[in-house]
Image (cartoon, rainbow, N blue to C red):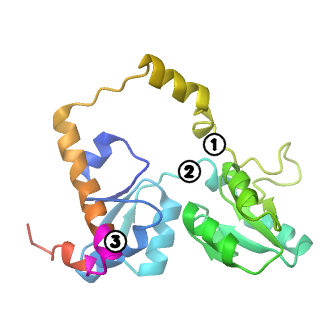
Amino acid sequence: MVVYANTSAAVKARSDWLVTSSCALDIVRALKDKGHKILWAPDKHLGGYIQRETGADMLMWTGSCIVHDEFKAFELEALKREHPQAKVLVHPESPADVVRLADAVGSTSAILKAAREMDAPEFIVATDNGMMHMLRQQNPGKVFIEAPTAGNSATCKSCAHCPWMAMNGLAGVAQVLEQGLNRIEVDPALIERARLPIDRMLAFTAAQRGGSNPGELVPNIGAA
């Protein structure tokens, strides 16, 4: 079982591997090469993208991100016609028909890298709009446009805003550090099990950075 980083400790404790959107393709490809079938959770769009890219045998959980699931391909096509010079940057948690319109698909760091390196005056960005500030800060000579999430009858043309992530703020962080509020208690036994897939991911990515073969860390079918 392979799960995305945005899951609870209880879900991680039931999994074999943890991934982020930056390393998911490499880890799933390595598992496929060793003959593993994959139960994927929780985001069906990210899982579908990884399955299409790797050819892995994957069974998807049917979850989705409330932000990325709302991007609309027909609206994106219309926006592309309005901005013919724009390149489209898409996070893989978006629906498949939106991903197909992308010039670059990837994680947050991959989107930032593509924006820096691609030679285009404008970019249409399909991910949480909290990214827009950093994109504009890092690329002052380029224009960044939020990808649309709704049709003509909608009251909000681009609503790519996660209400849960937006609850985090500097005042809240300061309050936690100064007063020790909002402490989260996790069963020590659960922590021990949940740490295993995290450690596997960290070892895999460390091997990649170190120039060794991370696939050697993936057991063969039937191996302990």
Please state which of the two labelled residues, at mark 1 or mark 2, is closer to the viewer. Answer: 1
Q: In the picture provided, is 91 more to the left or to the right than 193? A: right
Secondary structure of the magenta portion, mostly? helix
Question: Label 1 to label 2, Cα distance in Å?
Answer: 9 Å
Q: Earlier in the sequence, mark 1 or mark 2?
A: 2
Label 1 neighbour load within 10 Å: few <14, some 14-19, many 20+: some
Q: Tell me the tag on residue 53.
A: none
Residue 115 percent location from the top left of the image: 69, 70
Residue at 63% over, 37% down: 166
**Any part of residue 131 in sight:** yes
Are circles 1 and 2 on residues that touch, CB within 8 Å? yes
Q: Earlier in the sequence, mark 3 or mark 1?
A: 3
Q: Amino acid at mark 1?
A: Cys
Q: Is residue 189 above or below residue 206?
A: above
Q: Tell me the tag on residue 65.
A: 2
Bounds of the magenta span? 206-214
User: Which residue is identified by label 1?
Assistant: 162
Label 2 sits on a secondary structure element that is loop
User: Which residue is identified by label 3?
Assistant: 27
